[in-house]
Image (tube, rainbow, N blue to C red):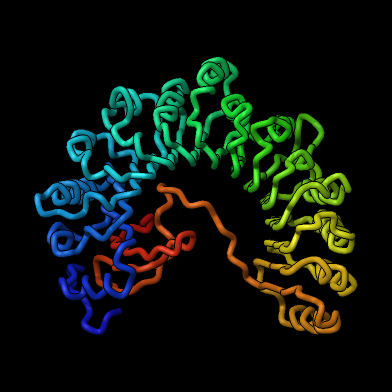
Amino acid sequence: MFPNGTPPTGRLAPELTDQIIDILHRDHFYLVTCSLVCKAWLARTRYHLFQNVVLAPRLTKPHTLTKCRDFLTLSRAPLCTFLPFVTKLSLDHGCEHMAPLILSSQEIFGMLAAVGIAPITLVHRFLEHSPLISASPHPFFAKSVTHLDLSFSKSGDWRSVVEYICAFTKLESLRIRDDNVWRASWHDNLTTMATALPMPLRDIIIDNPTLLMWLSEGHAARGSLHKLRLSFSRHSSGIWPTINAFFRHPSAQALEWLELDRTRLPSQLDEPLEGPEIASLSNLKHLQIAFWMNAAGSLLRDLLGRLQNPTNQVIPLETLTLKVSFPPAAAYISKDWQAIDAFLGSELTFPHLRRVEFAVKELAPEILRRNHLPSLADQLSILAFEAELDRPIASALRSDLRRCGERSLLHIDEGFPLAEPKSPEHLLPPIIEISDSEDEQILVGQDDENQIPVIIVTDTDDESE
C-alpha cells in the first residue's frame, strides 16, 4: 500500500502512476487490458512503456470488451508513442467479436513477436469466420511473430489449423494444446503439409504425443529442434512407442532440452509399460520428467535403470530433474525410494552431470543416506530439493558434507524454483500486491524468465484474474 493510498474508484493519480513506473525499469511492462481501471487511467498513464499486451475480452463480462476497445482507440491517437513497443499479444475467445477494430489497428502490432490464442471451442470455425485470424493470404501479424501458442477444444478440421501455423514464416516457438483424441483420418492432411512447417522452429510444446510423428516428418533432415516439452494426461495409452520413435528420428538429434510433463499413467494399460529411450539423444543436456506413480508399473524405476546404462555415457546431460507424485500406497513408495536410493548410490554414468533436482512431495530419509554423499560430492555441484527439508535431515546433510572434505563442491539447495516455459496465454507471473482498494487492485510482479517487471490492474471480485 502506498502512503498516499488510492481513491475508492481505484483510479491512480498521474504522479502515483509515474512513481510506480519510475521505480521499475522504464522499458519493459505488461499491460493487461482486460483489467484496466478506466479510460481516464489509461490516458494518464505512460502506457507507451508497456511492451506486452494481453487482449482478453470475456463475453460474460461486457466491461472487459469496453476496456479493450478503450486501449485500441487510445493507442491509435496521433500523439501515441506506443506503437513500436508492442511485442506480445494474447487473444481470448471473445476477440473474434473485436476483429474489425483490431484489424483497423494493425500498425500497433508492427513489432509483434508473440501471439497466444486462448482455449477455443470449434477452432476451425474460429479460423474460418474470424477475419483477425484468417486474413488472406496470411494473418496480418504473421510476418514478425516468432512465438505462437494455440489451445484447442473439440476442433474438427486440422487442415485449417496447420495452414494457419505454416503462415508464420519466422516462427521459432510453437505450443499446441489439444483436448482431442487423435483421429487417424487427420494424418493424411497433416502429412501433406508437414514439409511446410516454418524452417526456424526450435522450440515445441505439445500435449498430444501423436503429433510428434507429424512434426518429425516436417522436420526431417533439418535437425533444428532444440527444445521439446510434452505435456499430456489423456493420451497416455500407447504413447511411449511413438515418443521413442521420435527420439530415434533425425529431427530429434539436435534436442538439448527435454521435458515430459504431467505423465500421469492410467491404472491399466493395454500394453507393457515402456519408458523414454534417451540413449539416442546424443546432444541432450537438460532432462526433466514429471510423473505419477501407480500400480501399473514404475516409470521412475524404468527411467533410473536406463540412466544407469553404460551406453548413456555419450549423452552430455548436465541437469536431471525428477518431479514425482506418489500414490498413497506405501508399498509403491518403498519400491520407488529404493530405486532412487540405488541411483544415488551408484556411480553416475553421465560425466557432465552437475545438478540433480528432486521435486517430491513425500520426501523420505532413504534418499539421503549418508553413504551416498562421498560419491555424489565427487561429481555433482548441486543436489536440489523443491520440498523444504526437515531441519534434522538438513543439519545431518550439512554435517556429512563437511566430512567429505574441502574437495566437495556439493551444495544442498532447498526450495529451488523450477523454470516453466512462458507463453502469451500465461503472461501473468507471480504477483506482489502493492495497492488495494475496495474495487480494484494494483499489483506489481516480475516475469521470472526474462526478469521483466510487470504492472497488473485487476478486479478484486474476479477470482479468475
Image-based side of 53 in relation to 43, left or right? right
Image-based side of 140 in relation to 213, left or right? left
Locate residue 161, reporting x and y percent: 43, 26
Q: Residue at x 29, y 73 (%)?
A: 436
Q: Residue at x 20, y 68 (%)?
A: 10
Q: Residue furthest left?
A: 78
Locate residue 15, reporting x and y percent: 17, 75
| Residue 79 or residue 413, whichever sits in front | 79
Q: Quadrant of residue 128?
A: top left
The quarter of the picture where the C terminus appears is bottom left
Locate residue 345, reporting x and y percent: 88, 63
Against 435, residue 357 (above or below) is: above
| Residue 434 or residue 440, whichever sits in front | 434
Q: Is residue 283 visible?
A: yes
Q: Is residue 298 visible?
A: no
The quarter of the picture where the N terminus appears is bottom left
Locate residue 38, reporting x and y percent: 17, 59
